[in-house]
Image: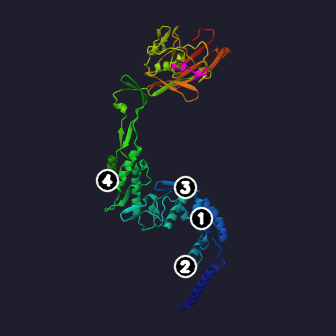
């Protein structure tokens, strides 16, 4: 047995010497270089020094990752550029592979190099920057907390929760390498043993606030804490209570007084026992303070539905007037004229007669299919050498303004015109409103010159007269044609304006066309001609 001691001793000494020499060699000669047979993600980096390695691996490592990291934190979605999250690639592990003071590590890793060793990239992740974009602030000087029994600051999404940086880094790397969305909760990033009860309290807070928001908006308040307190009940559940009941009542009383909406009777004309509505009435409303307070208390007991103010509806007086309300709230069209208030240096006497003629029309209702005749409306009666209407108004110069305004109203409402005559001379005041001074309608009692049209809507129409003096030396006359809100909508187009046989401003012929459409379909086309000749009998 003794004869083997020597070779065994020599073998041991040689082995120790070889290991020592290997240990010294790799930790000196190869101290700043990568050992042979080392690869990183399949790429050979043997004998590279650290500077070369950093330049080579940095660019390649980033190119293998997606350019964007998509993040979903409890339903809140956003994206971050990868190049801002990844600070770089650490090469220390690659350069130090197979080296160091631990002889067992050196030998173990050295043996692996015979077959080659493929290492992974060691990414350096900027966790602080990632947490800056996190929708919840996890380190805050003003965090959500339980103070006594009150739960405060839940609306800020700010907490004091320690972060497990290593766990978060691992999740980020996994999502980047797999090119998948990084789905996280606060629990996913919290360090082990962190108290997350406050997170649950604040989640309940956020759910409840969704129900309160309408009430806050109506009262012009910014925060639930303006009127409520959020607290932790004895049984561990979260609840709400009114901060100051007296203050809340006063707030509601002030809101009621400052925000009540008075009812409106609209606009209407009374004819007999009917109210002919040309503008709809509106209900008013006023806050019911007591019912609102009861509603708030019900919500505090069971915060599971939307919380809002309670209003009482206030009906307009027209509904209790006893009048039969008829709808004429759709303005089908209107005709307008104007007359100079001073003529020849004196007040225009014809204004009075024009206005009297139009007031005869005001409030007239024309039934569906019925023909309206201005002549038949005023029923001219002769008194000596004068003519008067059935109401006793003197018929004189200016009544043509009544028929011209009516003609324009029927024209713009798409109604069929059954009788209309132009004047025998061009009246200068009718030049206003249209491209050519040919949109007029004469009236004469004897011989009879009339204006008439038919109501071809499926509802009655109401004629309403408006007079105004805006201060520009003219008086404006308007006839509005109202009908039911459900009546068809007509589009009116006046076109092809033309004149011929033009001898002077008062002696010529002219015409224009009208197209009436409903929903783009033509329902009427007609032409209106005018002949002005001072030598004809004047009317």
Q: How is the protein colored in the picture?
A: rainbow
Name the one closer to the observer, 386 or 136: 386
Q: Which residue is mark 1?
A: 87
Question: What residue lies at 41% left-to-right and 34% top-to-bottom?
Answer: 264
State the separation of the CA atoms marked 3 and 1.
Answer: 17 Å
Q: Secondary structure at mark 4?
A: helix
State the separation of the CA atoms marked 2 and 4.
Answer: 69 Å
State the separation of the CA atoms marked 4 and 3.
Answer: 41 Å
Q: Which residues are magenta?
A: 340-352
Nearer the observer: mark 4 or 3; the answer is 4
2 and 4 marks in contact (CB < 8 Å): no
Q: Secondary structure at mark 3?
A: strand
Nearer the observer: mark 2 or 3; the answer is 3
Q: Residues within 10 Å of mark 2 (few under 14, many from 20)?
A: few
The quadrant where residue 9 appears: bottom right
Q: Is residue 521 visible?
A: no
Question: What residue lies at 56% left-to-right and 79% top-to-bottom?
Answer: 102
Q: Residues within 10 Å of mark 3 (few under 14, many from 20)?
A: few
Pinpoint residue 58: horizontal percent, then vertical percent.
63, 64
Q: Say whether disc 2 or disc 4 marks the residue closer to the N-terminus.
A: 2
Q: Is residue 484 above or below residue 310?
A: above
Pinpoint residue 172: horizontal percent, then vertical percent.
52, 61
State the separation of the CA atoms marked 2 and 3.
Answer: 45 Å
Nearer the observer: mark 4 or 1; the answer is 4
Q: Say whether disc 3 or disc 1 marks the residue closer to the N-terminus.
A: 3
Q: Secondary structure at mark 2?
A: helix
Pinpoint residue 347: horizontal percent, then vertical percent.
57, 22
Q: Which residue is mark 3?
A: 79
Question: What residue lies at 40% left-to-right and 42% top-to-bottom?
Answer: 260
Q: Which residue is mark 4?
A: 301
Q: Residues within 10 Å of mark 4 (few under 14, many from 20)?
A: few
């Amino acid at each position: 047995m003794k004869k083997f001691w020597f070779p065994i001793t020599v073998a041991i000494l040689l082995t120790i010497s070889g290991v020592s020499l290997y240990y010294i060699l790799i930790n000196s000669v190869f101290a700043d270089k990568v050992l042979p047979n080392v690869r990183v993600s399949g790429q050979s980096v043997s004998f590279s020094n650290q500077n070369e390695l950093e330049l080579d691996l940095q660019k390649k490592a980033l190119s293998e990752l997606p350019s964007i990291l998509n993040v979903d934190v409890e339903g809140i979605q956003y994206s971050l550029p990868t190049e801002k999250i990844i600070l770089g690639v650490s090469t220390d592990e690659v350069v130090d592979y197979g080296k160091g003071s631990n002889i067992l590590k050196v030998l173990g890793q050295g043996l692996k190099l015979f077959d080659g060793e493929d290492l992974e990239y060691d990414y350096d992740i900027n966790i602080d920057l990632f947490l800056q974009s996190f929708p919840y602030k996890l380190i805050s000087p003003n965090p959500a907390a339980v103070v006594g029994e009150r739960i405060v600051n839940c609306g800020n999404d700010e907490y004091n929760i320690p972060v497990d940086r290593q766990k978060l880094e691992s999740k980020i790397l996994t999502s980047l390498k797999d090119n998948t969305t990084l789905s996280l909760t606060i629990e996913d990033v919290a360090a082990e043993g962190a108290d997350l009860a406050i997170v649950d309290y604040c989640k309940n807070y956020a759910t409840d606030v969704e129900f309160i928001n309408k009430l806050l908006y109506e009262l012009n308040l910014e925060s639930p804490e303006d009127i409520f307190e959020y607290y932790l009940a004895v049984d561990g559940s979260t609840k709400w209570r009114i901060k100051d009941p007296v203050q809340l009542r006063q707030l509601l009383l002030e809101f009621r007084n400052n925000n009540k909406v008075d009812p409106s009777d609209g606009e209407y004309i009374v004819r007999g026992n009917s109210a002919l509505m040309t503008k709809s009435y509106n209900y008013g409303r006023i806050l019911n303070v007591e019912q609102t307070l009861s509603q708030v208390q019900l919500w505090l007991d069971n915060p599971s539905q939307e919380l809002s103010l309670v209003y009482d509806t206030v009906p307009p007086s027209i509904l209790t007037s006893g009048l039969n309300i008829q709808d004429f709230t759709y303005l089908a069209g209107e005709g307008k004229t104007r007359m100079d208030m001073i003529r020849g240096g004196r007040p225009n006497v014809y204004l009075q007669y024009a206005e009297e003629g139009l007031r005869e029309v005001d409030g007239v209702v024309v039934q569906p299919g019925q023909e309206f005749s201005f002549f038949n409306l005023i029923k001219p009666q002769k008194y000596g050498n004068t003519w008067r209407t059935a109401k006793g108004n003197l018929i004189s110069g200016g009544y043509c303004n009544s028929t011209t305004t009516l003609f324009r109203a029927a024209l713009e409402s798409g109604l069929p015109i059954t009788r209309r005559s132009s004047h025998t001379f061009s009246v200068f005041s009718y030049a206003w409103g249209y491209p050519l001074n040919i949109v007029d309608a004469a009236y004469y009692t004897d011989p009879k010159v009339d204006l008439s049209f038919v109501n071809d809507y499926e509802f009655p129409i109401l004629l309403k007269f408006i007079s105004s003096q805006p201060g520009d030396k003219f008086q404006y006359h308007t006839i509005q044609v109202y009908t039911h809100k459900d009546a068809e909508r007509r589009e009116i187009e006046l076109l092809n304006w033309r004149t011929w046989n033009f001898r002077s401003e008062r002696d010529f012929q002219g015409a224009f066309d009208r197209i009436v459409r409903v929903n783009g379909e033509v329902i009427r086309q007609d032409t209106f001609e005018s002949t002005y000749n001072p030598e004809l009998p004047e009317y």
